[in-house]
Image (cartoon, grey):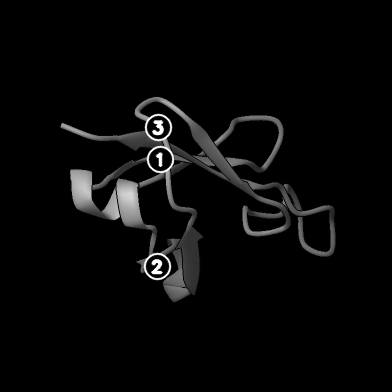
Amino acid sequence: MANAGPTDGDIRATLALSQSEARMGSSRTLNLPGGRQVTVNIPAGVQNGEELRLPGQGEALWQGGPVGDLILTVSIP
């Protein structure tokens, strides 16, 4: 689903939504590397190509180091 950035710990992924989910808002539980799960609240009116950023939900560059963000790019068919 996602890849960590090579130097920043960010995880970037595409989040596919139906038109109804985008219009009304929704929430999704995503599986992240290492078996972690995160629930993403999708705001009503989100647009195709918009990025949703969840600070601190990425990966640490080294043990005990700073944690990057989870960055989701919305895709609406």
Q: CA separation, marks 3 and 2?
A: 15 Å
Q: Which amino acid does label 2 sit on?
A: Ser
Question: Which residue carries the number 2 mark?
Answer: 27
Q: Which amino acid does label 3 sit on?
A: Gln
Question: Which residue carries the number 3 mark?
Answer: 47
Image position, residue 60 (x, y; %): 71, 54
Q: CA separation, marks 1 and 3?
A: 16 Å
Q: Residue 13 carries which label?
A: 1
Question: In what quadrant of the picture does the C terminus appear?
Answer: top left
Q: CA separation, marks 2 and 1?
A: 16 Å
Q: Which amino acid does label 1 sit on?
A: Ala
Task: Answer with mark 1 or mark 3, whichever residue precedes in sequence.
Answer: 1
Farthest right residue?
65
Residue 3 figure quarter: top left
Q: What element carries label 2?
A: strand
Mark 3 closeness class: few <14, some 14–19, many ≥20 residues within 10 Å = some
Task: Answer with mark 2 or mark 1, whichever residue precedes in sequence.
Answer: 1
Q: Residue at x 47, y 30 (%)?
A: 50
Image position, residue 70 (x, y; %): 57, 49
Task: Answer with mark 3 or mark 2, whichever residue precedes in sequence.
Answer: 2
Q: Which residue is drawn at 66% across and 47% down?
A: 69
Question: Is 7 located above or below residue 58 in the figure?
Answer: above
Question: Is 28 located above or below residue 25 in the figure?
Answer: below
**Which of the pair 25/52 is nearer the observer?**
25
Q: Residue at x 27, y 54 (%)?
A: 21
Q: Which residue is drawn at 84% across and 64% down?
A: 64
Image position, residue 76 (x, y; %): 24, 35
